[in-house]
Image (cartoon, rainbow, N blue to C red):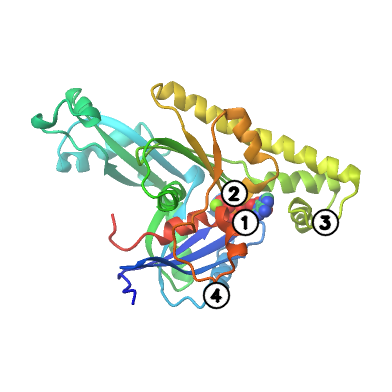
């Protein structure tokens, strides 16, 4: 029998379009998918990562927990977008205590907010090499120059407090607050087995487009922009003169359209998607100037809006980099009795953040 490990958490991806929930049981016999589901949110409940309607979001989470019969109260959720900054910095080598006491000052120049308004977290990436380790590649080079790499994560306090209050209001214990980009990276690493080299993950949700470039397992660049599937809804609402819900239906191919209307819809897709692709290309250009020796070998796409017709192909064509849809379920053990495989594979790219979150456990890092 599979013996579950302790300290498991419920992964809750609270997006502006929908909330996704995943439970994974990590056992001595592998990782089992135990629960997956989602619930939609009304359009104004969360706007660009900020919770506008606490009560509405909280009751949606309660409904989801009830529908999925979730017992565990310990959850991990994530934030993203404008309120969180993930950045790899190189600073003069120093010991742990000195780093702890100087990190705020070092971070200040990289953060566009008042340092008093952010929660700061960091992780040492290249430990300062001892003399015997010099000449050994990257860490050695850095040590020669007297530098060390540190990953900074700065999140605006008001947003962090909002997410914590939301979960507490819902009767849950917020055990970990993660970042979308890291959750996606964890989900991808699980699906790919071991990962080396340089690749990018592009997550296109409803109101956010997140780009994360990863080299040898470490994020070297992240950017979130205010693009997403909602742009298409807005365009449909104005061009077709329909309300939001009808626009969503038209977008997802659930409405009968005449030839002329199909042409209009296609035009909207093309226009919005080319905006996304240009944004991604700008990020890749910036990356190749900053890291001239690195080249992105592959782009993984995720998020509900990565399935907008044409996006995958157009991105591949314009960047000349192979593009793949992320399937975070691929290395999980899944009972076909409990989960419809067709539904799971349809939902896969949209579930990626939640799967990545559910892989976390208390005290894992
Ligand atoms: N099959 C599909 N084809 C095209 N678009 C889709 C499809 N399924 C979902 N979407 C769109 O994807 C978006 C939702 O994706 P996702 O769940 O990743 O966003 P979110 O996490 O709620 O939002 P965000 O992260 O931007 O705050 C919506 O705009 C939805 O209309
Ligand atoms: Mg999202």
Ligand 1 closer than 8 Å to label 2 CB: yes
Does the residue at mark 1 contact the one at mark 2 (Cβ under 8 Å)? yes
Q: Are marks 3 and 4 in contact (CB under 8 Å)?
A: no
Closer to the eye: label 2 or 3: 3
Q: Which residue is drawn at 44% across and 52% down?
A: 191
Query: Foreground mark, 1 or 3?
Result: 3
- CA gap between label 4 and label 2 equals 29 Å
Q: How far apart are marks 2 and 3 (CA)?
A: 22 Å
User: How far across and how far down the image is residue 204, in percent?
Assistant: 58, 45
Q: Nearer the viewer, residue 184 or 341?
A: 341
Q: Is residue 15 visible?
A: no
**Mark earlier in primary sequence (1, 2):** 1
Circle 4 Cα neighbour tier, 10 Å, few/some/many (<14 / 14–19 / ≥20): few
Q: Mark 4 points at which residue?
A: 337
Where residue 365 sits, quadrant-wise, is bottom left
| Residue 61 appears in view | yes
Q: Residue 17 carries which label?
A: 1
Q: Where is residue 74 in the image (x, y as percent from the top left)?
A: 39, 69
Determine which residue is flagged by label 2.
205
Looking at the image, residue 18 sits to the left or right of residue 143; the answer is: right
């Amino acid at each position: 029998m599979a013996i579950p490990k302790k300290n498991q958490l419920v992964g809750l991806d609270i997006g502006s379009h929908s909330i996704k929930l995943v439970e994974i049981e990590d056992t001595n016999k592998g990782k089992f998918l135990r629960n997956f589901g989602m619930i939609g949110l009304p359009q104004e409940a969360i706007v660009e990562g900020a919770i506008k309607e606490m009560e509405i979001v909280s009751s949606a989470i309660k409904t989801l927990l009830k529908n999925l019969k979730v017992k565990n109260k310990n959850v991990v959720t994530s934030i993203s977008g404008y309120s969180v900054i993930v950045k790899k910095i190189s600073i003069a080598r120093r010991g742990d205590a000195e780093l702890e006491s100087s990190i705020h000052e070092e971070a200040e120049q990289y953060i566009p907010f008042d340092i008093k308004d952010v929660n700061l977290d960091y992780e040492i990436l290249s430990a300062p090499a001892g003399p015997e380790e010099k000449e050994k590649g990257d860490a050695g080079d850095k040590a020669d120059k007297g530098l060390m790499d540190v990953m900074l994560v700065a999140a605006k306090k008001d947003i962090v407090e909002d997410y914590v209050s939301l979960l507490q209001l819902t009767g849950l214990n917020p055990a970990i607050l993660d970042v979308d980009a890291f959750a996606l990276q964890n989900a991808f690493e699980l699906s790919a087995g071991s990962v080396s080299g340089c690749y990018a993950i592009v997550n296109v949700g409803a109101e956010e487009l997140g780009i994360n470039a990863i080299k040898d397992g470490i994020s070297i660049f992240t950017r979130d922009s205010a693009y997403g599937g909602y742009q298409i809804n807005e365009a449909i609402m104005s061009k077709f003169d329909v309300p939001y819900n009808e626009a969503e239906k038209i977008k997802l191919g659930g409405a009968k359209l005449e030839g002329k209307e199909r042409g209009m819809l296609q035009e909207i897709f093309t226009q919005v998607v080319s905006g996304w692709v240009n944004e991604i290309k700008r990020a890749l250009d910036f990356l190749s100037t900053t890291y001239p020796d690195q080249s992105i070998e592959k782009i993984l796409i995720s998020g509900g809006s990565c399935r907008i017709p044409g996006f995958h192909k157009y991105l591949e064509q314009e960047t000349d980099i192979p593009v793949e849809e992320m399937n975070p379920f691929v290395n999980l053990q899944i009972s076909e009795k409990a989960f419809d495989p067709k539904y799971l594979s349809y939902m896969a790219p949209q579930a990626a953040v939640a799967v990545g979150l559910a892989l976390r456990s208390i005290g894992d890092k």
